[in-house]
Amino acid sequence: MAPSPEQQAVPELEVAYPDEQLGSKMGIEITEWDPARVVATMPVAGNRQPFGLLHGGASAVLAETVGSTAAYLNRVGDRRPVGLELGCTHHRSALAGLVTAVCTPASVGKTVGTFEIVISDEEGRRVCTAKLTCIYRDATPQA
């Protein structure tokens, strides 16, 4: 079984239900990962809404994937990020090819991190701007 996009960037990440990862099903590939910047691509094909455009929810999944990965890379100690709020503004349609998400930290503290995600089409046109806020929680054993 291929690792999830998040495991590609953070191999030590323990993933529950590895065969059920949404990012993998949507074709997301993380291509660059560093606490200061996480980049990923996703195909439009297979992630469309009924009119043939990239589904806004697919953009949200891509944003959440890179934002959560960045949040994990910016954690302090063994604290784990948990998504608190995701907001997406959709600027234009993507019709084909790949979209690319670039995530950068806006503010990261010990308990809260906020990340900006810009999703662009293959011509570099902004498709979506998203903001993800995560809360950092102490790691607890899985039930």
Image (tube, rainbow, N blue to C red):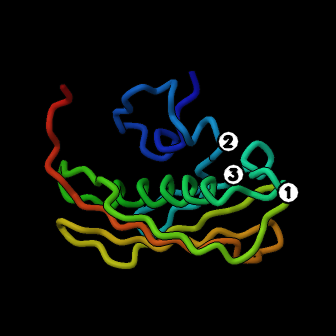
Q: Residue at x 24, y 68 (%)?
A: 112
Q: State yes or no: discs 1 and 3 in contact (Cβ < 8 Å).
A: no
Could you tell which of marks 1 and 3 lies nearer the N-terminus?
3
**Element marked by disc 1:** loop
Picture layout, residue 134 above or below residue 48: below
Position of residue 67 measured from the top left corner of the image (x, y, whole percent): 45, 61
**Element marked by disc 2:** loop
**Element marked by disc 3:** strand
The answer to which of 90 and 44 lies nearer the viewer is: 90
Q: Quadrant of residue 132?
A: bottom left
Position of residue 74 measured from the top left corner of the image (x, y, whole percent): 32, 62
In this picture, residue 47 sits left or right of residue 112: right
In this picture, residue 18 sits left or right of residue 78: right
Q: Which mark is residue 27?
A: 2
Three-letter amino acid code at the position of disc 1: Ala
Position of residue 140 measured from the top left corner of the image (x, y, whole percent): 14, 38
The answer to which of 58 and 140 lies nearer the viewer is: 58
- For disc 1, the marked residue is 96
Q: State yes or no: discs 2 and 3 in contact (Cβ < 8 Å).
A: yes
Residue farthest toward the front in the current orientation of the protein? 50
- For disc 3, the marked residue is 42
Q: Quadrant of residue 100?
A: bottom right
The C terminus sits in image quarter: top left
In this picture, residue 12 sits left or right of residue 65: left
